[in-house]
Amino acid sequence: MALIAIIGSGFSGISAAAYLAKAGHEVHVFEKNASAGGRARQFKTGSGYVFDMGPSWYWMPGVFEQFFNDFGCKAADFYTLTLLDPAFEIVFSKEDKVKIPASFEQLCHLFESIETGSAEKLRTFMQEAQYKYEVAMNQLVHMPGLSLGEFLNADFLKGMLRLDVFQSLSKHVSKYFSNEKLIALMEFPVLFLGAKPRDIPALYSLMNYAGLKLGTWYPQDGFGKVVESMVEVAKTAGATFHFNASVSGINTKDKKVTSIMVNDNVFACDAVVAAADYHHVETLLKHEHKNYTASYWSGKTFAPSCLIFYIGVKKQVKNLLHHTLFFENSLAVHADEIYTDPQWPSQPLFYVCCPSKTDHKVAPAGHENIFLLMPIAPGLEDTPELREAYFAEMMLRLEKHTGETISTDIDYKKSYCVNDFIGDYNAYKGNAYGLANTLAQTALLKPKIRNKHLSNLVYAGQLTVPGPGVPPSIISGKIAANQLINQFKQQPA
């Protein structure tokens, strides 16, 4: 049995802790914040609001289910999932709004009503997307990305062309649809992957299958309940969690980690899983032990940061769904101002989540819980004045959409942006989603899951394989855990 320290308790850290503890190791998780979950933390107000701080789209339910199944249980043992119908709404203008139904057949009818012939094209598109999803989820996402040999098997190579790795998602979508609204709908899931549609491989049309075919779900009590449930699984397996426990150093000897510094105390260990920000963990190492240089990180394409507002409203808001995307402006312009010419957006798109429409427990009776999110470039200047200027614009458009005044009924408000991501998560440039899933940053080309110089240090989370998002992070923790489990199996007792 080895004593293993895990730095960070986001989804990847919790996942790694559970699998390592199940394998019989002594596992200690060190979290700098007061609660588990990382970006998926939850906070409660004295007046009765419960806010999920980050993730709000529950896609790929099979990944969550597989995690619980690996420990002899199921998600339903811990929380209840609600299928959202409509799944979400896209606002193109006050008069032009599209609600996305949960039923795929109804979705086909919707497409046909917008563009003649598109229903059949959507069915064909989804068949290909399903193939990509199944190959990705059954093979690709579980590969540690350490060598080319992982990809050299007959079945994978045979289907390589169908995966569309070398074609952009933008070109792929335009082969099927010409209507701008349908293109926007099919391209929007890449917002979760952190890059422009023209820069992301068409492989990621698998996200369309995940969201539009497998459904958009909501875990009752919010994503915080998912975090709580996974922590319970990890604790039952034997893991121990330490909160308000900041790791400030990693000590090494003979090409191995020997201990970590926790709140200025030495914690001896046999191995470390770095499930905190990859770049930050590297700053805790000596120069000769780092996987990557400062220039490596500065040359990478990072997913966006976000400006977020958590607001409580002392009335019920009409004409608002659980998820609403405000796409009145150009996705291309907003994307350019994130990736090509980083600046605060001139014509922003944004997203609104109102979980109290589905879950009465997240707000006081008769109130609404509303979450506003606007993607922005990482590393931007972050001031209270800028936050408030964009809050005013988002509220104006939200009120226009709902047809009622909301701002005068706000009884709770909190903002969160670049500086908070840096302060709470040591996030590189305040990024919210990790590395963008461009072709040059996919699979083997992502930051390595193993340290090249220290044999007992592995990484997990959204800056390594398989990539950004909650389901990939859960899988990342499992991959990292398996690296150490197999390593200790091969060592003499």
Image: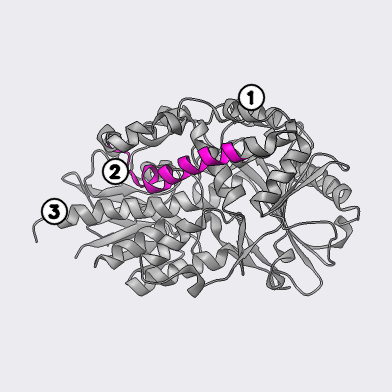
Q: Nearer the viewer, residue 159 or 302?
A: 159
Alpha carbon of mark 2 to alpha carbon of mark 3: how far? Answer: 17 Å
Q: Give yes or no for contact between labels 1 and 2 (Cβ–Cβ under 8 Å).
A: no
Q: SS of the residue at dot 3?
A: helix
Which colour scheme appears in the figure?
Answer: one colour
Q: Position of residue 336 (x, y in %)?
A: 65, 27
Q: Nearer the viewer, residue 372 or 169?
A: 169
Numbered label tally: 3
Q: Which mark is residue 424?
A: none
Q: Magenta stretch containing residue 131, yes or no?
A: yes
Q: Nearer the viewer, residue 176 or 195?
A: 176
Q: Magenta stretch containing residue 349, yes or no?
A: no
Q: Earlier in the sequence, mark 1 or mark 3?
A: 1
Quick check: can you spot residue 376?
no
Q: Which mark is residue 490?
A: 3
Q: Position of residue 377 (x, y in %)?
A: 62, 35
Mark 2 burial class by Cα count in 10 Å: few <14, some 14-19, many 20+: many
Q: Residue furthest right?
A: 404
Q: Earlier in the sequence, mark 1 or mark 2?
A: 1
Q: Give yes or no for contact between labels 2 and 3 (Cβ–Cβ under 8 Å).
A: no
Q: Earlier in the sequence, mark 2 or mark 3?
A: 2
Region rendered in magenta: 123-146
Q: Position of residue 459 (x, y in %)?
A: 35, 47
The residue mark sitting in front, 1 or 3, is: 3
Residue bearing the label numbered 2: 450
Quadrant location of the N terminus in the rendered image: bottom left
444 left or right, relative to 432: left
Quadrant location of the C terminus in the rendered image: bottom left
Mark 3 burial class by Cα count in 10 Å: few <14, some 14-19, many 20+: few
